[in-house]
Image (cartoon, coloured by chain):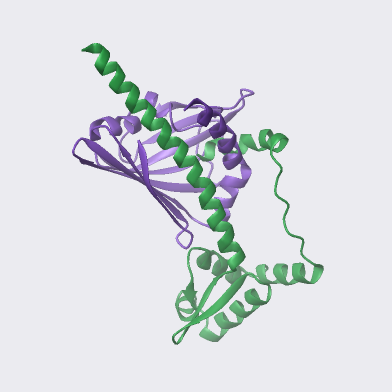
Chain colours: A purple, B green
Amino acid sequence: MTVISTIPDREKLQLTMVAEFDAPVEEVWQVWEDPRKLEKWWGPPTWPATFTDFDFSEGGAAEYHMTGPDSEKAPGYWRFQAIETNRRIQIQDGFANEDGSMNEEMPTMVMTMTLDEEGGKTTMTTVSKFNSIEDLEQLLEMGMAEGMTLAMGQIDGLL
Amino acid sequence: MPGLVRSVLSYNQMVVDVPTKPEFDEDQVDLVFHALADRTRRDIMGKVSRGEQSISDLARQYEVSFAAIQKHVAVLERASLVTKRVQGRQKLVQNNPETLRRATELLAEYERVWTHRIKAIGQILDQGKDEERKAR
């Protein structure tokens, strides 16, 4: 696994990450399509994600929550805006209410993931796009970055 | 990732120092609140936060005159919410550089989130390979 490049675009408020995996495209696709695999990487180790509903189809939605160290739950949802098997996914990610419904008052963001295979290796490009600097700030300031940084300190110890 | 965020707040405040905001003087606060008290000006802020725009571009998007938009931008500029720069014959309006710097910092933090995820995906794929090898 190698991160090939990282392209932050502060004008467009988006982050592009390009990574290469030593695996065929079908296997990389599975970490997005299979909710049990997805759960192993979407949330940080201290806040693992559990997908409780997963309608993997265009226009379909997924419900998930993350569970914190004190068993507190943070609910979120995905809406699959586009799916091209083994090629591309576009997802809107947002906050959910306690009952799993979408919380329209909170910020949302859009992620686009593209796969390209060459010589048995797969390049994965993800573009994360925020609507406004306020949204990005709110998402990060409310704890995501700190939570992630803490979690990453732990995972770096394991690798 | 938003799902994580809200509930983490209280947890993180216990362990992480929340950066303190720079203090503004009262006159500056008045200017900012006056500037943001107007719906069109708030809307302009939203538009330029997504990327700089010329005053003519902005004027085209509202049903008011070019001069009116120019005045709105001047009010935002006095409150240090936006800055103008000249490019050729155009005047481009952009978020205050401080805000842009903040955007850069925030994107760098978000980058760490993805670096972690990519590592985790790499591990899942490697595990799959190990299992395949054992099965043979």
Q: Residue furthest right?
A: B26
Which residue is at the front of the view, A94 or B134? B134
Residue A114 rendering spot, x and y as whole percentages: 30, 45
Q: Is residue A10 above or below residue A36?
A: below
Picture quadrant where residue B78 is located? bottom right
**Along the horizontal axis of the image, is A25 left or right of B86?**
left
Residue at the image point whose x is 59% and y is 77% from the top: B73
Total labels: the figure holds: 0
Residue at the image point whose x is 66% and y is 72% from the top: B80
**Along the horizontal axis of the image, is A52 left or right of A47?**
left
Q: Is residue B31 above or below residue A122?
A: below
Residue at the image point whose x is 67% and y is 36% from the top: B12
Q: Is residue A85 visible?
A: no
The C terminus of chain B, quarter of image:
top left
Residue A26 rendering spot, x and y as whole percentages: 24, 32
Picture quadrant where residue B72 is located? bottom right
Picture quadrant where residue B71 is located? bottom right
